[in-house]
Image (cartoon, coloured by chain):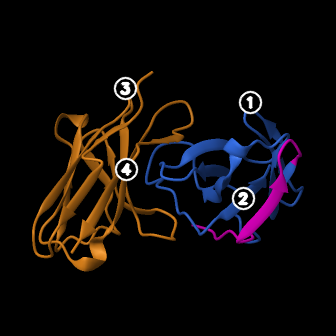
Amino acid sequence: DAKTTQPNSMESNEEEPVHLPCNHSTISGTDYIHWYRQLPSQGPEYVIHGLTSNVNNRMASLAIAEDRKSSTLILHRATLRDAAVYYCILRDSEGGGADGLTFGKGTHLIIQP
Amino acid sequence: EAGVAQSPRYKIIEKRQSVAFWCNPISGHATLYWYQQILGQGPKLLIQFQNNGVVDDSQLPKDRFSAERLKGVDSTLKIQPAKLEDSAVYLCASGGPPYNEQFFGPGTRLTVL
């Protein structure tokens, strides 16, 4: 799987937007960009994924650069509950075959009240 | 909708003992994954099942780890004999249509003394 690079940690204030960057300069044409997060003492949780176009769901937005070599996860209004480790992961398909996730170290997001 | 269930939640054993973990995936999910998460690291895939067949076990230490998914539903992961370095959280995840996004259980925290 292609590699991703994320900052080790980021800090933000409650009720403000948060932009979490991810670099994936060796992404291939069939790689989807997935984001998962892991709250303390819990298993990871799916957040969002996309291929080329920007994506929105109830949890977050995903902005993908035109060359697909980077992406940004956007939390529009952070709450204390959003404090977690955020993982940016490239995945070669949307289903079928060997598609286990390759987790890096992720970004530890700290939310200040 | 019920989530992924795992048991036990915690287990403490001595090195060279055996241990088994159980996972019940989300109903209808054909794909099941086991991950190992060592403290301070992201989860690492151990094995992926599609129904009751193994899709990927390339990172499973087969000299001591084994896993099965009889009848394509529940799964068990066994370690025999355990080593100190097996101390970790063992996470089970299942994936289903349409995007095979993975839903994780709470994990089993294993301590090997």
Q: Nearer the viewer, mark 3 or mark 2?
A: 2
Kind of residue at badge 4:
Gly
Report the residue marked by disc 2.
Answer: A109
- Counting residues from the N terminus, which is met first, the one under dot 2 or under dot 1? 1
Marking on residue B28: 3
x, y percentage for residue B80? 12, 68
Query: Within the image, what quadrant is residue A67 found in?
Result: bottom right
Q: Secondary structure at mark 1?
A: loop
Could you say which disc has been placed on residue A58 in the image?
1
Query: Do the residues at pointers 4 and 2 share their chain?
Result: no
- In the rendered structure, the residue with mark 3 lies on which chain? B
Which stretch appears magenta? Answer: A1-17
Examine the rendered structure and indicate whether residue A25 appears above or below residue B99: below
Do discs 4 and 1 belong to a common subunit?
A: no
Image point 31% across, 62% down: which residue? B57
Asked if marks 2 and 1 fall on the same chain, the answer is: yes
Q: CA distance from mark 4 to mark 1?
A: 26 Å
Q: CA distance from mark 4 to mark 2?
A: 22 Å
Circle 1 Cα neighbour tier, 10 Å, few/some/many (<14 / 14–19 / ≥20): few
- Tell me the blue chain: A
